[in-house]
Image (spheres, rainbow, N blue to C red):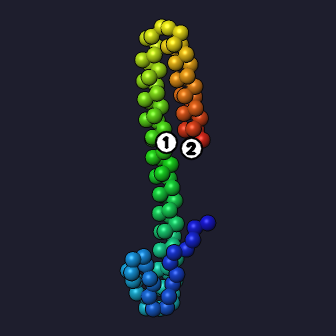
Amino acid sequence: MIEKRFDFKYEYITLDEGVFATAKDKQNAELISRTLNQLYEENEQLKSELQKIYEIATINKVRDIVDEVYDDLLYETSDESDYARKNVLKCLEKIDLLRDDLE
């Protein structure tokens, strides 16, 4: 639940950092208060969505890097490179699961 940050007052509304919005009557004060609270809630939702987009983009970049490592390992043939390829494939699977969880 999002805490309301703006309460109406009959003569003025106090905003963050000492900014004031004057209202001539209670109805205007309530309208301003309601509008500010709606904008605050919308802003919080947008920040959350932006954070999610950032996390998914970061995971995609990590996956691309690990995928490049896997491609490089494909050209090597040894028991060590086989072991490394298997581990890289496991990493790719875990990265995909993490991305799926975020989406």
Marks 2/1 in contact by CB < 8 Å: the verdict is yes
Q: Is residue 7 left or right of residue 69?
A: right
Q: Is residue 62 above or below residue 80?
A: below
Sequence-first tag of 2 and 1: 1
Sort mark 2 into few (<14), some (14-19) or many (20+) by Cα contacts within 10 Å: few
Left or right of 94 in this view: 57:
left
Residue occupied by mark 1: 56
Secondary structure, mark 2, is: helix
Mark 1 element type: helix
Separation of residues labelled 2 and 1 (CA atoms)? 7 Å
Q: Position of residue 94 (x, y in %)?
A: 58, 32
User: Image quarter for residue 20?
Assistant: bottom left
Vertically, is 56 above or below 19?
above
Residue 24 percent across, percent down from the top left: 43, 91
Give the residue at x 43% y 35%: 61
Seen at 45% across and 84% down, the residue is: 13
* Rendered location of residue 87, percent (x, y): 55, 22
What amino acid is found at the position of numbered circle 2 in the picture? Leu
Residue 96's disc is none
Residue 21 picture quarter? bottom left
Q: Residue furthest right?
A: 1
Residue at the spot of label 2: 102
Q: Residue 91, position in %: x, y?
A: 55, 28
